[in-house]
Amino acid sequence: MKLTRDRWTAILMLLPSVVLIGVFVYGFIGQTAWTSFSDWGRVSSQALAVNPEIEMVGWQNYRDLFTGFIDVRFRQDLVNTFFFTIFFLAGCLGLGLGLAFLLDQDVKGEGFFRTLFLFPMSLSFVVTGTIWRWMLQPRGGVNVLPTTVGLPAWEFRWLTDRTQIWRFDWNALPGMTGLLVAAILLVVALSSWRGGRRLRAAVALASGVMLGAWALTLGRSVALLPFPELHGFNIAFVGIILAAVWQMSGYTMALYLAGLRGIPSELREAARVDGANEIQLYRHVVLPLLQPITLSAMIILGHISLKIFDLIFAMAGADNATTDVPALLMYLTAFRANQFSKGAAIAMVLLVMVAAVIVPYLWTSLRGETRR
């Protein structure tokens, strides 16, 4: 294909950006991956040496993180991230959708309320964390609110409570993961069957059944650790979840409100003429049309929750293990303990987790644009 002058101009204009992204994004990702397979920092005296003696140790850092005796904090951090993501998504989507429904009723002062609900999003997580840290002090903030009406103060230890609920054994993780994937495949099979794609439904059903049987067998025969290791949801995360939902629910409200305003009024009127009440209207007409917005919001909020750092650092500090997450542990491991290889391994685990959320969404979106 002959390159025209316009194409050469476009290439030359894009080339600096491509080079910079290649060096400062993918080049550094490659450097981090290389470091994660080394022993850089395992010997403290060699960590900051001018010419450190570095040897490649393969997957040892990753094995230590998931099965090592001293890396129990990392495994609890993964559990913290899982629960935080679930409650953060549910809170933002539910509250954002509810606020969007209320504002869609042509209320007076809609512009004021829309700005009011969106305002928290304009703040940085550091500012939000600082404000909520003051509010959730054990002997101040919201705990003393009952005293204004003559009641005794609350004694809830918001960010320091060490109570855990919903505990499970880390050794059961492979089997639980397999069962979760099998359940997802079964849901895909049911959806495909309803959509008339019988071959896809059969493949998904067979894969789900085989994976479920394999997960049950694996859970009984394979142990990641030679001893039980219990993990669960730390109650101290309740305050952090409240702060995160307060800040980001306005964003989901704006997305849903834009989606509601984009639904033609003729569809709603047609549903009402057919006899649908308001609940049926929202269940069978409005909510199905909002599914793409829900998916987009879940992807954006999901990758925020997986790499959350500044909010927790501002609210609970770096040394509060009960509210720790992998991003915070990566900072402590790499830049306080100078264990660069293990810190890089944590960073790569985070990268894989975020990519597992983002890449399928981007691939589906680009595939849909190509078809159009």
Image: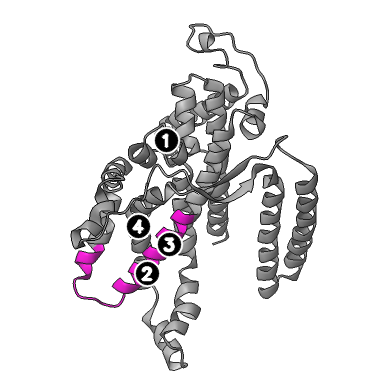
- Is residue 350 visible in the rendered structure shown here? yes
Where on the picture, by quarter, is residue 263? bottom left
Residue drawn at the location 47% of the way across and 50% of the way down: 84
Q: Please state which amino acid type lies under the numbered disc 3.
A: Leu
Residue 59 lies in the magenta-colored region:
no
Q: What amino acid type is highlighted by mark number 2?
A: Gly
SS assignment for the magenta stretch, majority: helix
Q: In the image, which disc is placed on residue 320? A: 1
Q: Earlier in the sequence, mark 1 or mark 2?
A: 2
The answer to the question of whether label 1 and label 3 lie on touching residues, with beta carbons closer than 8 A, is no
> Which badge, 1 or 3, comes first in the chain's sequence?
3
Dot in front, 1 or 4: 1
Magenta span: 87-114
Residue 98: numbered disc: 2
Q: Does the magenta portion include 105?
A: yes
Give the SS element for disc 3.
helix
Of 51 and 61, nearer the camera is 61
Instruction: Specify the label residue 251 is tagged with.
Output: 4
Q: Earlier in the sequence, mark 3 or mark 2?
A: 3
Q: CA distance from mark 4 to mark 2?
A: 13 Å
In the image, residue 90 lies at what x, y percent? Answer: 46, 60
